Amino acid sequence: MELEMMKSKFHNVKLVVFDLDGTLLNSQSQISEESKYAIDLLKEKGIRIAIASGRIFSMIKHFSETLGLKDFIISSNGAAIDDLSTNQPLQQLFTNPKDAKKVVEFCVKNHIECNILKRDACYFQPYSRRIDRFNLYNIHARQVHSDEIKIILYDDGIHDYSKIEKLLIYEMDETKTHQVLEFVHENTKLIHMSSGHGYTDISSPGVSKGHAVKKIAEYLNISLDHVCVFGDYDNDVSMFEIAGLAIATANGSPKALENADFITLSNDDEGIAYAIKKLLLS
């Protein structure tokens, strides 16, 4: 898309949606002051702001508060949508409990890491390689007086498979990942998507960031042509495909870069601020 055309489209934007990791957050998981300032410029123009992440709600809330956002949070890759102005959920799509149980038991049997994520609690196997990240998050949450995540260890399974937003498979061995996906396809009605290198999300049918963005646009009576989205990975492509303007950070995956209308600087080089200022102010 030509730059002048993008500038024209951006001036008609009424909703901007930001992915978190690899996009709005830098490599230190921080939002830069430049990004905060650029987002304030959007808010001053009356543009609605949403965050769309694979994280659960409780791991996104702090960042929305840092930005002073009052609009929407899309969590678990679109399984949940929260309207921050009313503190009410706009959407909650949970995995089928029986299907989730099948996948968890398959992973346990084959010694594959499977994190079970609910809105405010995460379940990990004792040998999880990701639990340290969540423990570090809780340390930071205590420091900034934010909500901590309830961390629970499990061996063979959990007692209650209801209200699961997603299962997160963390496996660097592609053969094992393929085994899980084959099992999911043949034995459940769940869907899967890649949310990062080695990360595979197992979710309810109909879950995607794109579907969630579309639901928010319909709720606000905003045309998708007037929606701008920022992202960096494969799970952001569903947003890119429906939005009027799709912007990827330079550190994005090949699939994200291929489907973007505009490629900005990387998340460590003020890519968000650069794009907003170039399209909004120049």
Image (spheres, helix red, strand yellow):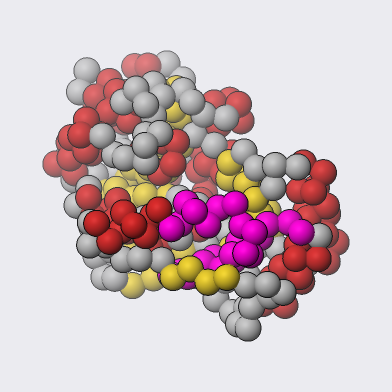
Residue 256 higher or lower than 161, as above or below: above
Residue at far front of view: 127
Counting from the top left corner in percent of width and height, residue 40 is at 17, 40
The residue stretch that appears in magenta: 111-135
- Horizontal placement of 154 versus 211: left or right? right
- Vertical placement of residue 263 versus 189, above or below: above
Between 145 and 227, the one lying in front of the other is: 145
Q: Is residue 271 above or below residue 142?
A: above
- Of residues 39 and 181, the one nearer the viewer is 181
Queried whether the magenta region covers residue 132, the answer comes back as yes
Q: Is residue 19 in sight in this rendering?
A: yes
In the image, residue 202 lies at what x, y percent?
65, 58
Image position of 189 (left or right of 73): right
**From the image, which quarter does the C terminus lie in?**
top left
Q: In which image quadrant can residue 145 be found?
A: bottom left
The residue at the point 42 percent across, 16 percent down is 2
Total marks shown come to: 0
